[in-house]
Image: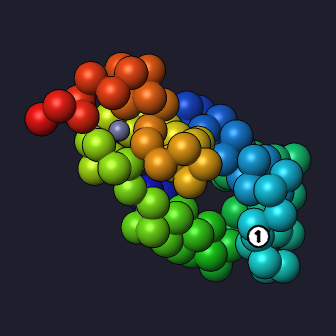
């Protein structure tokens, strides 16, 4: 993510953070910033806050990988949360094991 935060990414980030809050996966610093982003949008973040959230997102991506497509089919940040629960991304899940034959 660069300095430019577009509307689509803003909404995606809010969805992602809302789910993490619901799942109680955030520690205090990230939790506070997430509340702010949900309330006021990603553009309200200071550079320092942005750094914390960027790290959170990057770490989440790093530790999460779809067993089938190796994240090649990832469409949005919330797909990573889906992988944590299902082992595969929504696209691979919907393909009904089609890619497993490879
Ligand atoms: Zn996949």
Ligand 1 rendered quadrant: top left
For this orientation, the residue located farthest to the front is 101
Disc 1 under 8 Å from ligand 1? The reply is no
Front in this rendered view, residue 74 or 57: 74
58 lies left or right of 99? right
| Quarter of the N terminus within the rendering | bottom left
Q: Quadrant of residue 89?
A: top left
| Location of residue 93 in the rendering, given as x and y in whole percent from the top left corner | 44, 29
Residue located at (78% from left, 78% from top): 27
**Vertical position of residue 60 compared to residue 43: above or below:** below
The residue that label 1 is drawn on is 26
Which scheme is used to colour this image of the protein?
rainbow
| Quarter of the C terminus within the rendering | top left
10 Å neighbourhood of mark 1: few (<14), some, or many (≥20)?
some
| Location of residue 57 in the rendering, given as x and y in whole percent from the top left corner | 54, 62
* Residue 5 can be seen, yes or no: no
| Location of residue 19 in the rendering, given as x and y in whole percent from the top left corner | 75, 47
**Vertical position of residue 100 compared to residue 17: above or below:** above
16 lies left or right of 4? right
**Vertical position of residue 47 compared to residue 98: above or below:** below
For this orientation, the residue located farthest to the left is 102
| Location of residue 49 in the rendering, given as x and y in whole percent from the top left corner | 68, 73
Q: Quadrant of residue 10?
A: top right
Residue located at (38% from left, 56% from top): 65
* Residue 89 can be seen, yes or no: yes
Residue located at (85% from left, 69% from top): 32
Front in this rendered view, residue 78 or 45: 78
Which structural element holds mark 1? loop
Residue located at (29% from left, 43% from top): 68
62 lies left or right of 73? right
**Count of number-bearing discs:** 1
């Amino acid at each position: 993510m660069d300095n430019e935060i577009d509307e689509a990414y803003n909404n995606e980030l809010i969805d992602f953070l809302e789910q993490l809050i619901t799942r109680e996966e955030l520690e205090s610093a990230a939790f506070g910033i997430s509340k702010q982003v949900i309330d006021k949008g990603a553009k309200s973040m200071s550079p320092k806050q942005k750094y914390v959230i960027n790290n959170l997102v990057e770490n989440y991506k790093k530790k999460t990988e779809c067993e089938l497509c190796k994240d090649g089919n990832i469409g949005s940040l919330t797909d990573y949360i889906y992988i944590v629960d299902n082992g595969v991304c929504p696209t691979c899940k919907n393909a009904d094991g089609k890619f497993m034959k490879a």
